[in-house]
Amino acid sequence: MNTATHTLDPHAGHAHHPTGLMRWLTTTNHKDIGTMYLTFSLLMFFVGGAMILAVRAELFQPGLQLMKPEFFNQLIGVHALVMIFAALMPAATGFANWMIPLMIGAPDMALPRLNNWGFWLLPPAALLLTMPFILALFGIGDGAVATGWTLYAPLSVQGGIGVDFAIFSIHILGISSIMGSINIIATLLNMRAPGMTLMKMPLFCWGWLVTAVLLIITLPVLAGGVTMLLTDRHFGTHFFDAAGGGDPILFQHLFWFFGHPEVYILLLPVWGLMPHVLSTFTRKPIYGHTAQVYGFIAIGVLGLIVWAHHFMTAGLPVPALLYFMYSTMAISLPLAVLFFCWIATMWRGAMSFETPMLFAVGFIVLFGIAGLTGLVLADVAADAQYHHSYFVVAHFHYALFAGGIMGVMTGVYYWLPKWTGHMYSERLGKLHFWLTVVSFNLTFMPQFFLGLAGMPRRIPDYALQFTEFNAISTVGAFVLGLSQLLFAWNIWRCVKGGDKATDQVWEGTSGLEWELSSPPPYHSWDTQPVIKSST
Amino acid sequence: MNEATLPPPRKHGRLVVRLLLLAVGFFAFGFALVPLYDTFCEAVGFNGKTLRDATQAKDLPPSAVDYSRKLGVQFTSTLMPGLPWEIRPLEPAIELHPGELRTTRFLVRNLSDQTIVGQAVPSVSPTVAARSFQKLDCFCFTQQTLAPGESREMALTFVVDSGISKDISELTLAYAFFPAPPKP
């Protein structure tokens, strides 16, 4: 720690930390680090969004108008990597940093310095990922990774320097995520308030516990896979080179062994926070706490053994296809338990529809569409038609935008008054919700029909019959993108000032985090609260 | 800060070490998948992977010729980018009895003015038949070097095991010829 922090300070014990830039560079405070994660996430959300708006602009009409196909290919892949690794995952980690210590009555995260490293690895990784774009402007290299985010061999073995940048970026992002996960597990297992048994732990913490375990299991496999890719590219190995006895399909196995659990890594924190929001705005206790905990665990375990449904058309033998089809469909059972609990929590509640509740209900409806279309894709016979089409694009955006991003927005609106001590503008928030939900459907609903009609993904041009749906989708995407500026504006206003939030913030809240002041003091829970046994 | 109110410091060391070991273990698992996957594919014939050399296998059942059945076998071949060769099967399709020893030939010609090394990689479809396609001698066992303009007939000797599933009446052996990676 900086020696300056040990000088005599009248506020010692409350805010003995450096100020200005040094505060943020050296901080080990979970609230500061949470804020940095969330700010970084919001920034990268706009970076990734700008990339895909360029793509949608190109797809507004058939033919090539704005960019070369090579650049188009770079944009779609980097968009995905930025949104997944630099926007959605840091947002969830930001939530974890801010809320887990408050929720379990801990003074901070278990390993505060590791926490600081975990965050500060992210900006260099994001820079590595996007730098080839800038280097290409100066004539160095041929731009960013152009393989799509899946980095499939042998294309990625042959790609330009963008692939190397992406590989190293994934290494750094992976180290950051694993450090964050270790920290969260250590906090959750070792630092709960006395009396808070594992089963009494709030569901948001449970969602994150399963996520953290999944990250530690799967990210190293991806790191190994991209390391093999790197040695194939530069050191003469033939992991994925058929001529040297390797197998390109092996890369798909390694990638999706990580890639499928990654979906649940992105969604479990959101599933964890939903019951809290639903319970708050229906003024009822969470329905089925224990059932949801087992649901999270079941989905986490099942998620690890279904990966090959992402490449059912790669030539897997029939018994393997059947196994991956049935095991994938089996995930809908624990997921249905979660949906049931969410709806049962709302059932006959005294509901009010503040912005977080609007987002939560929107999440349930739209994420339901993601789940149902996922069942269609899991069907081996149907998948042969839908694979690599816009149907898949629409499906996973319902899962990751409506499920992931809108879930994060739910959490931001729900907790923002607690973090800042001010209420956000409810009027702007509701406007943001309605613009988002309408334009989101305008963007992605047509893509289901495009996929059914046979439009392949990752192609900058298309046949004339797809024009109308693509035009609608592009208009929707621009409204969707621009309405997120309202979100940023609302957050900014709320940070700067606004109506004072009460400690409890919302009428129907319960839990340790709402017993602290809004905003909570820089150091909270110096004295651990004790959870009384309710039985 | 009032030290007395702080909870006793917890020891996270053991848990952190265990979690790190878990991460390292799965990093190793990723690499372990390479040989595992190869063994698995060869054992069950996934991906149309045939046994590398059937004479090496010790546990093959003696294969009696089954004259009551006839099987169609087709041969195809493709060249991967960067290999300026020409390859074609001299017999695109043959008929045989399961268990019968057969030899067929492929004509390979180097169209360039350089000496080039190539490696053929076989694949059998339907994939469930891959285990039954037993190669006793094959030009795909080793790398092949062709001088400028040289053409050569390359032989393949094989048996289709008489235990092959009754559902299969026709199978295809496809060769992909790759430019061999330069020797380190």
Image (cartoon, rainbow, N blue to C red):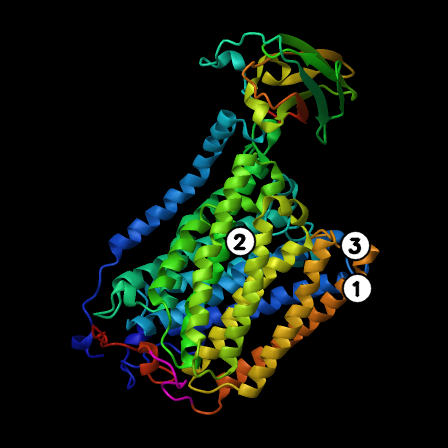
Give the structural element (helix, strand or loop) at label 1. Answer: helix
Give the structural element (helix, strand or loop) at label 3. Answer: loop
Pointer 2 residue: A169
> In the figure, A289 relative to B144: above or below?
below
Q: How far apart are labels 3 and 2 at the CA level? A: 32 Å
Percent from the top left, x then y, of residue A162?
63, 50
**Foreground of the two, A55 or B180:** A55
Which label was assigned to residue A468? 1
Identify the residue at image location x=36%, y=58%: A294
| Quarter of the rendering occupied by the N terminus of chain B | bottom left
Identify the residue at image location x=38%, y=85%: A518
Question: In the image, A260: left or right of A149?
Answer: left
**Foreground of the two, B14 or A315:** A315
Chain for numbered disc 3: A
Q: Do labels 1 and 3 share a chain?
A: yes
Q: Earlier in the sequence, mark 1 or mark 2?
A: 2
Identify the residue at image location x=50%, y=27%: B44
Q: What stretch of residues is rendered in magenta?
A: A501-510
Q: Looking at the picture, which amino acid does disc 1 mark?
A: Glu
Determine the image quadrant of residue A127.
Answer: bottom right
**Foreground of the two, A520 or A514:** A514
- Contact check, label 3 and label 2, Cβ < 8 Å: no
- Contact check, label 1 and label 2, Cβ < 8 Å: no
Pointer 3 residue: A462
Q: Looking at the picture, which amino acid does disc 3 mark?
A: Tyr
Chain for numbered disc 2: A
